[in-house]
Image (cartoon, rainbow, N blue to C red):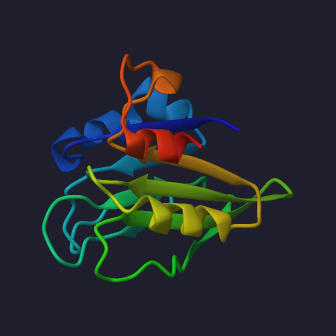
Amino acid sequence: MTFVQWNCRGLWNKRISLHSPLSSTAQFCIFRETFFNPDDHLRKSPFLYSHRQDRSGGVLLTDIPKIACGRILPTLISEDTNLEILATEIHYNNHKFIIVNLYLPQGFDIDQAKTFFHSLSTPVIIFGDFNLHHPMWGSKSSTSLSNGFAD
C-alpha cells in the first residue's frame, strides 16, 4: 500500500496537484488544512472528510481507492476540544485497518489525544500535523508536551 500526506494550506486552488505523479500513484491520500467548505465537491475517488464546526479553515480529508470500503469512526472526543480528528476504518485487499488523520494545535490536551489512541484496537496508521518538536522527529529541541507525546 502507498500513502501520501499533505498539509495543504488550501487545496481548492491546488486541486490540479491531486493528479500529479505523486498523488496519482498513491493508493491513499491524506490531506489537512484543505480549507474546503461543506458545499465544495470533488469528482475523484471516494473522499471521507470532516469540517470544523466552530471556525473556518482546517478540514481533514482522506482519499481512498474506489475498490476500498471506508467509514468514519466516532472519535468520542469532546465537542469543545480544539483537536481535529478524522478516523476512518478501511477494508482493502482483505485487510482491515484504521487511518487516523489529525491536526493537533499548539498546546493541545495530551491526555485527550492519548485516550483516543488507546481506544483503537485495529491496526492503526497515524498521519498528522502535531505542532510538536522533538529530536526523535529531527528537531534540535523538545518541550514537555512533545516529550509526553513521544512517550
Q: Which residue occupies 44% across, 58% down?
A: 110
Q: Is residue 110 above or below residue 121?
A: above
Q: Which residue occupies 48% across, 39% down?
A: 147
Q: Residue 8: horizontal and vertical position, in percent?
A: 27, 41
Foreground residue among 128 and 141:
141
Quadrant of image for the C terminus? top right
Q: Residue 82: horizontal and vertical position, in percent?
A: 28, 67
99 left or right of 23? right
Q: Residue 122: horizontal and vertical position, in percent?
A: 77, 63
Q: Is residue 121 above or below residue 104?
A: below
Q: Residue 143: horizontal and vertical position, in percent?
A: 36, 36
Residue 103 position by quadrant: bottom left
Residue 113 appears in the picture as rendered: yes
- Find the residue positioned furthest to the front: 144
Residue 47 appears in the picture as rendered: no
- Find the residue positioned furthest to the right: 94
53 left or right of 97? left
Q: Which residue occupies 20% across, 43% down?
A: 9
Foreground residue among 140 and 23:
140
Q: Is residue 80 above or below residue 151?
A: below
Q: Which residue occupies 43% across, 56% down?
A: 102
Q: Is residue 139 above or below residue 148?
A: above
Residue 90 position by quadrant: bottom right
